[in-house]
C-alpha cells in the first residue's frame, strides 16, 4: 500500500498530469450533474403520455449509445487533431450545447433536445478518449499504470458525486439550475486544459480519413474473429453483457417503483445510484481477497450466485429498503464479476489484439443496458414487478456455472508446416481466428494418451509467436485442427519444456 502511495505521488509530480487530472475532475463532476438533469427531464418530469419506462429507455440510450458507436471511431480523430485542442474545445462545445438546452427545458422533450444531448455525451467520449491517449506523453512510463488508476478512480468518484448531488438538489433548483452548473463547470475544465504545456500534437497517419474509418471496421472484424476463437475471452465478455442487461432491467424497475408506487421524485434515483455506488466501493476493496483462494471464473460464478439469491429472495417483499438492498448487492458483486472477467480477457488475448477486442468489449458492455430498458417498456406493463425481479434472480443463478464451463472449453488452431503434411515436420505458423501467425519452435515431444484401451501417440509443440506469446499445442493430423493447450503472454514465465 505504501509503495502504491509513493508511485501515485511520483505520478502527481508531473505538472501536466496534475493539470489534466484537474480538468477531468471538474468535467466529470459536471457529467454527473448532467446525467441528473437528463434523468429528471426525461423520467421524473415526463409528460403523461410517456411512461416512466419509456423515459428511462430514452435516457439510457442517449447516455450509452455514443460510448458504444462513437467510441471505436474516436481514434481516427485523436490521431489527426491536436490532442491539446481536443481537450480544450470539446468542453466548450458541451457548454455551448448546454446553453442551447437551457432554451428548451420549459417544454416537452423534442428532437432538438435529444440531438443536443447526444452532442454533449459524444463530446464527452472524445474528451475522455483523448485524455487517455495523452497520458503516456504526460507521465513517465514507470508511473503510467498508477497514473491511469488514479485518473480512473478519481474521475469515477467525481462523476458519481455530481450525479448523486444533482439528483438531491434537482427539486429545489430545477433542470435549468442543473444545466447552469454544467454551463459554468465545462468552461472551467476547458480553461484548466489550456494550462497543459505539452503541445500534444497530432500523430498523423498515412491513411486518409475515409480509409482509416474502413481500416477501423476491418480491425474490429479481426478482433471479433479472434474473440470467437478464444472461448475464455468470449465467455467473459458475454457474462458481463448478461450482467449489464440484468442491471439495466433492475434499474428501470427500481426507478418505476420509486416514482409510480412510492411516489418519490428524482432524489430517489440518486439514492438508488448511491446504494449501488457504495456497493461498488466495498466490492472494489474486497475483490482482492478472493485472489489466490478461487480461480477467476469461480469468483465470477460466486458473484452471479449471490446476486441471484438476493434478487429472488427480495422479490416477494418489494419495498424501498429491499430495493436499495438489491442495488447495493448488485454494486457489491459487480467488481467481483468485472475484475476477474477483465483479467481472464487480458490473459487470454495477445497484446496485439487487445485494443480491437476491448473496443468490442466496450460495445458489449454498454448496449445491453439499452436493450434491457427497451424490453422493459414492453414487459413492465404486462408483468408484476415481483415476477420481473424474481426472473432476474433466476437468470443470475442459472448463469453462475456458465463461465467456469466456458473457460474449460478446448481451443483449436490450424498449423502450417514448412513442407509436406507430416506431423513430424516443423511448424512455421498457426492459424487462430482466420489469422496466420508466424511461430518459432521452442521445443517438441511425443506423449501417449489413453484411447479406448489402446494408447495413442500425440505430438506436442512449444511455440513462440512474433509478439513473444508462448503457445503449447497438441494433436495428430498435420492438416487438421490442433488443440491449443496453453497460451502464456510475453511478459509471463512459461513452464519448462518437457523432454
Image (tube, rainbow, N blue to C red):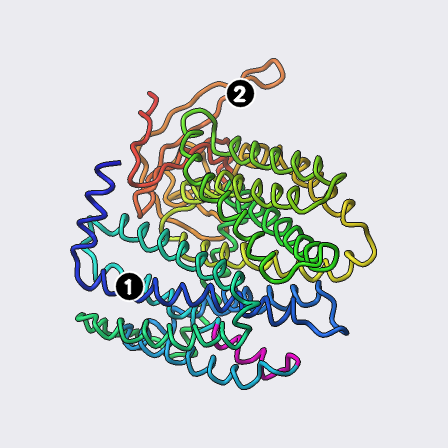
Tell me the magenta residue range: 108-120
For mark 1, what is the residue? 22
Q: Residue at x 25, y 52 (%)?
A: 144
Alpha-carbon span between mark 2 and mark 1: 64 Å
Rendering quarter of residue 261: bottom right
For mark 2, what is the residue? 456
Chief secondary structure of the magenta portion: helix
Label 2 neighbour load within 10 Å: few <14, some 14-19, many 20+: few
Side (left or right) of 242 relative to 185: right
Q: Quadrant of the N terminus?
A: top left
- Estimate the x, y position of residue 123 in percent, counting from the top left: 43, 74
Q: Residue at x 77, y 45 (%)?
A: 386
- Estimate the x, y position of residue 225 in percent, counting from the top left: 52, 53
Numbered disc 2: secondary structure: strand
Instruction: Name the residue at the right extreme.
Output: 382
- Estimate the x, y position of residue 57 in percent, counting from the top left: 66, 64
Magenta-colored stretch includes residue 111: yes
Q: Nearer the viewer, mark 2 or mark 1?
A: 1
Label 1 neighbour load within 10 Å: few <14, some 14-19, many 20+: some
Q: Is residue 44 above or below residue 420?
A: below
Amino acid at each position: 500500500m505504501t509503495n502504491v502511495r509513493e508511485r501515485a505521488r511520483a505520478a502527481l509530480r508531473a505538472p501536466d498530469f496534475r493539470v489534466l487530472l484537474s480538468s477531468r475532475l471538474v468535467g466529470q463532476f459536471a457529467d454527473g450533474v448532467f446525467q441528473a438533469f437528463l434523468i429528471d427531464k426525461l423520467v421524473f418530469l415526463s409528460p403523461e403520455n410517456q411512461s416512466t419506462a419509456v423515459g428511462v429507455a430514452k435516457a439510457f440510450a442517449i447516455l450509452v449509445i455514443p460510448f458504444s458507436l462513437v467510441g471505436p471511431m474516436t481514434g481516427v480523430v485523436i490521431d489527426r487533431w491536436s490532442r491539446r485542442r481536443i481537450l480544450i474545445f470539446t468542453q466548450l462545445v458541451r457548454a455551448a450545447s448546454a446553453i442551447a438546452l437551457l432554451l428548451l427545458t420549459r417544454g416537452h422533450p423534442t428532437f432538438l433536445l435529444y440531438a443536443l444531448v447526444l452532442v454533449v455525451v459524444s463530446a464527452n467520449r472524445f474528451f475522455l478518449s483523448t485524455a487517455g491517449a495523452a497520458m503516456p506523453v504526460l507521465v513517465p512510463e514507470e508511473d503510467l499504470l498508477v497514473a491511469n488508476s488514479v485518473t480512473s478512480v478519481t474521475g469515477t468518484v467525481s462523476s458519481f458525486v455530481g450525479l448523486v448531488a444533482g439528483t438531491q438538489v434537482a427539486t429545489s433548483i430545477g433542470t435549468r439550475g442543473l444545466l447552469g452548473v454544467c454551463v459554468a463547470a465545462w468552461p472551467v475544465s476547458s480553461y484548466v486544459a489550456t494550462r497543459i504545456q505539452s503541445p500534444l500534437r497530432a500523430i498523423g497517419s498515412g491513411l486518409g480519413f475515409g480509409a482509416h474509418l474502413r481500416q477501423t471496421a476491418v480491425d474490429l472484424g479481426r478482433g471479433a474473429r479472434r474473440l470467437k476463437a478464444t472461448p475464455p475471452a468470449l465467455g467473459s465478455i458475454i457474462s458481463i453483457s448478461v450482467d449489464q442487461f440484468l442491471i439495466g432491467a433492475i434499474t428501470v424497475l427500481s426507478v418505476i417503483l420509486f416514482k409510480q408506487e412510492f411516489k418519490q421524485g428524482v432524489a430517489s434515483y440518486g439514492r438508488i445510484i448511491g446504494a449501488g455506488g457504495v456497493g461498488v466501493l466495498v466490492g472494489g476493496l474486497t475483490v482482492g481477497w478472493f485472489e489466490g483462494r478461487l480461480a477467476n471464473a469461480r469468483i465470477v460464478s460466486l458473484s452471479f450466485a449471490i446476486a441471484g439469491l438476493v434478487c429472488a429472495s427480495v422479490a416477494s417483499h418489494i419495498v424501498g429498503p429491499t430495493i436499495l438492498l438489491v442495488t447495493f448487492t448488485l454494486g457489491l458483486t459487480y467488481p467481483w464479476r468485472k475484475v476477474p472477467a477483465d483479467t481472464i480477457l487480458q490473459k487470454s488475448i495477445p497484446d496485439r489484439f487487445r485494443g480491437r477486442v476491448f473496443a468490442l468489449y466496450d460495445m458489449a458492455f454498454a448496449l445491453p443496458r439499452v436493450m434491457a430498458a427497451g424490453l422493459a417498456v414492453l414487459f413492465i406493463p404486462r408483468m408484476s414487478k415481483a415476477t420481473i425481479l424474481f426472473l432476474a434472480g433466476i437468470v443470475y443463478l442459472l448463469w453462475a456455472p456458465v463461465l467456469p464451463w466456458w473457460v474449460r472449453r478446448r481451443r483449436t488452431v490450424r498449423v502450417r508446416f514448412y513442407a509436406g503434411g507430416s506431423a513430424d515436420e516443423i511448424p512455421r505458423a498457426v492459424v487462430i481466428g482466420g489469422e496466420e501467425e508466424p511461430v518459432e519452435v521452442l521445443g517438441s515431444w511425443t506423449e501417449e494418451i489413453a484411447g479406448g484401451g489402446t494408447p495413442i501417440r500425440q505430438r506436442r509443440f512449444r511455440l513462440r509467436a512474433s509478439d513473444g506469446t508462448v503457445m503449447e499445442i497438441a494433436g495428430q493430423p498435420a492438416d487438421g485442427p490442433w488443440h491449443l493447450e496453453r497460451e502464456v503472454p510475453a511478459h509471463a514465465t512459461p513452464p519448462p519444456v518437457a523432454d
